[in-house]
Image: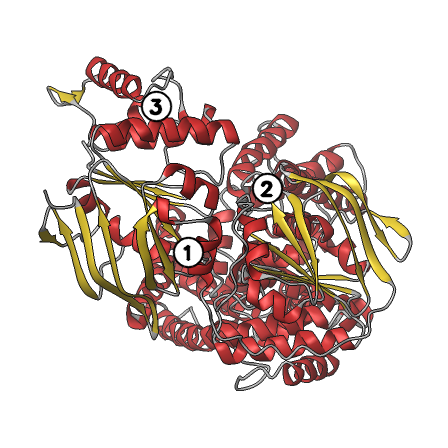
Amino acid sequence: MPPVVELHGVTKRFGAIEVLGGVDLTLDAGRVHALAGENGAGKSTLVKMLGGIHQPDAGQILKDGVPIKMLGAADSQRQGIAVVHQHPALFPDLSVAENVFIGRQPRRMGRIDWPGMISRANELLLRLGVALDVLTPVKALGVAERQAIEIARALSINARVLVLDEPTSALSRREVDRLFELVGRLKVEGVAILFITHFIDEILGFSDDVTVLRSGRHVITAPVEEFTPELIVRAMIGTRLEAFFPKQQAKIGAPVIGVRGLSGAGFVEDVNFEVCAGEILGFFGLVGAGRSEVASMLFGIVRPDEGEIEIAGASVRPHSPRDAMRLGISLVPEDRHNQGLVLPFTNRANETLPVLRRLCGHFGLMRRDEEKKIATDYSARMRVVATGIEQVTGTLSGGNQQKVLLAKWLIPGPRLLILDQPTRGIDVGAKSEIHRVISQLATEGLSIIMISDDAEELMGMADRILVFRNGRIAMESRRGAFDREALLLAAAHAPRSSDAQPPRAA
Amino acid sequence: MSFPLRLFVRWETFLLLVLCATLILGTHVSRYFATSSNISIALASITPVAIVALPMTLVIVTGEIDISVGSIVGLCATSMAVCLEHKFSVELAMVVGLLVGTLAGLVNGLIIVGFGLPSLVVTIGTLALYRGIAQIMLKERGVSSFPDWYQSLGFGTIGNGPVPWSSLLFLALFGAFAIFLHVTRWGRAIYAIGNNREAARYSGIDVRRTILGVFVASGAVSAVAAIVLTAYLASARSDTAMGLELPVITAVVLGGVNIFGGSGTLPGVLIGLLVLAFVQNAFGLAGMTPEEQEIVTGSVLVMTLAIFGLSGAVRRLWRR
């Protein structure tokens, strides 16, 4: 019997970047196949390919041994492939039954066959062992129940392949167990399951086969019995050449900001740390681990439920970004396009946006010359490559936009600079320039919090790294004692197997 | 700001051509069109619209809209009329009008900012609310006991030339608004909010206070328009300025202000106002009724939006 779905050497490029290069994957009926890899390894591109959103540039997708082409989500459904997302996109005001059958409502004489739809929805949920009133509007349900609805939808199209895209990140421990039980039933019915997760213990506990991707390449596929947590992590990170991080040793001074017992933003709990002058403190963790949430609490975007923030010995409570700026905090936000920059503005206007008040004379009139001078100065310092300060920021490359954003947040002259994923999605050249600038700033005595998904980047730049997991600090590590595997394990919640020594490259 | 600037230059050129075409067409419609008294009538009749268009530009650039301006003008006119009925001086009536307008704008702004509601819906509500209050206050009565000097605000011209006094008032306000929007930090904040509210907030701009401010300005300046309009009509009724929002929004959008916020300039709006004034005037001379002119104004608004929408669509296609 051929595998249900096979991927043969699939390749996908976005512009010049190859996000998947010749990847093979085989999904067998009645088996759970786990897909592991760091952020940017190509997992989500692969999922989108199976979902019909992306088409491979090269390679083939085979269904029951026959090559197929999928040109959209509808095609993929027709092929019996169902994708369950981390945050299911359902219609909140419609009932459970309607969501299960959306777009395919059973009809009778041109109208929706309500009794039929209700009884079939009940039947499906019963098969999944989920007790839900099918007439409840979806907005009244939690994430776990919404995922159950997506799985029921998969059942209703008689899906033979179920793709679970990081389904457990938003679930509690008990809900995860329920999900696994539910997926277990489908497995018994002969459905092939592809399971994407960051959590290594879930891979080991739940899957039958494991494939690891790294930088868009296939690394290894083997039955789960052949893996230990360390082996998976090592396959994920490989033995890459150390990237060049021009870390300059800065003199670390007195604490600038202290945080005690910080809780809030839904799930951040009891976070404690301090940052000293000249220090770069790294925040590492998976997406949604609470790193950015701590940053938004410091910057006055989200109010903490509990805890104390202390700057220069005084307890403070920033209620707005403006408050935070007055306290000497700058935040380079994660989302450059939505939170960081006004893209139709010129570089000049973007860079001076936080300091408009300072650039004003009488009656709020802008002092143009001073504005130009500051913008020119900082654009030069950040080495922004543009036709000048009057170029529209939206027309710059990602790397140069990031440099404009960095300039924007240095102009206020902060004491503490928070950088949320400052090098994400930008090219290597701009990346190393930004690293150089960050390092330089630390030597000038600035305190820096640097948030990143890239353990290697933090190991290159930071003096200390805090690892976040589920809204808490799971581990702290100092420069000199940085260990990639330990960082990843702490972030991904895998218990270290006691017998296996962390294997060193021979 | 080269992006809005480029758009403005192109749109401004186009508008100037349209203005010329209108003027040429006008002289063909009637010999009377190019006379000093006709130009003065055209300018005086658009002035209340032009005055309200100034704060409306701010409101729309911020990404909001104020549909209730006509009703605010009506409410201010009614308040002044009631003052005059009670034998208050006309100066006091004007002060009361200004206060009422500011208060109406403040109420709009507080509801929008305080409850986080869409301004379109809120101001549709207050459009009915303010007009209703005016109708209860003044019923069917009309008040026309304005002193002569007051009426000359609406009709009188400078040295009996073609330029009405009210246009001078408008120009002063225009200068103030243009400086505010294009040269001060508050103007910069307004563009930032209209383009990207989230980034504005992350930059330490007080988004809510700014939005509140533009709605208060809208109310206060509507009161000024009420003074000019009652002077022009030499009477105040509860239905004064009914439907004023249509030509106001038309002129602003015609002037190149993006209906979704973030771009547009006041000089552009000025040309838009002139085009609208002379188009309406020419059609009036051609014997069109006010009702038929409504159709023209409405069509101009929809067509302008369509051109902008189309040019956006074309640009997106081009990029592909």
Q: Position of residue A215 (x, y in %)?
A: 39, 65
Side of B152 relative to A164 (left or right): right
Q: Residue furthest front?
A: A499
- According to the picture, the residue beneath numbered tag 1 turns out to be A37
* Mark pair 2, 3: CA separation: 29 Å
Q: Position of residue A69 (x, y in %)?
A: 14, 54
Q: Residue at x 58, y 35 (%)?
A: B126
Locate residue A377: give its quadrant.
bottom right
| Residue toward you, B174 or B108 | B108
| Residue toward you, A217 or B109 | A217
Q: Residues within 10 Å of mark 3 (few under 14, many from 20)?
A: many
* Mark pair 3, 1: CA separation: 34 Å
At label 1, the amino acid type is Gly
The correct choice, above or below, for A127 with respect to B204 in the image is: above
Q: Residue at x 56, y 66 (%)?
A: A456
Rendered-image quadrant of the N terminus of chain A:
top left
Q: How is the image coloured?
A: secondary structure
Can I make out residue A26 in this image? yes
The correct choice, above or below, for B298 with respect to B315 in the image is: above
Disc on the earlier residue, 2 or 1: 1
Q: Chain of mark 3?
A: A
Q: Position of residue B308 (x, y in %)?
A: 37, 63
- According to the picture, the residue beneath numbered tag 2 turns out to be A470
Q: Chain of mark 1?
A: A
Q: Residues within 10 Å of mark 2 (few under 14, many from 20)?
A: many
At label 3, the amino acid type is Val
Badge 2 marks a residue whose secondary structure is: loop
Locate residue A83: give its quadrant.
top left
Side of A312 relative to A97 (left or right): right
Locate residue A483: give its quadrant.
bottom right
Q: Check whether the beta carbons of the residues at disc 2 and disc 3 lie within 8 A of each other.
A: no
- According to the picture, the residue beneath numbered tag 3 turns out to be A96
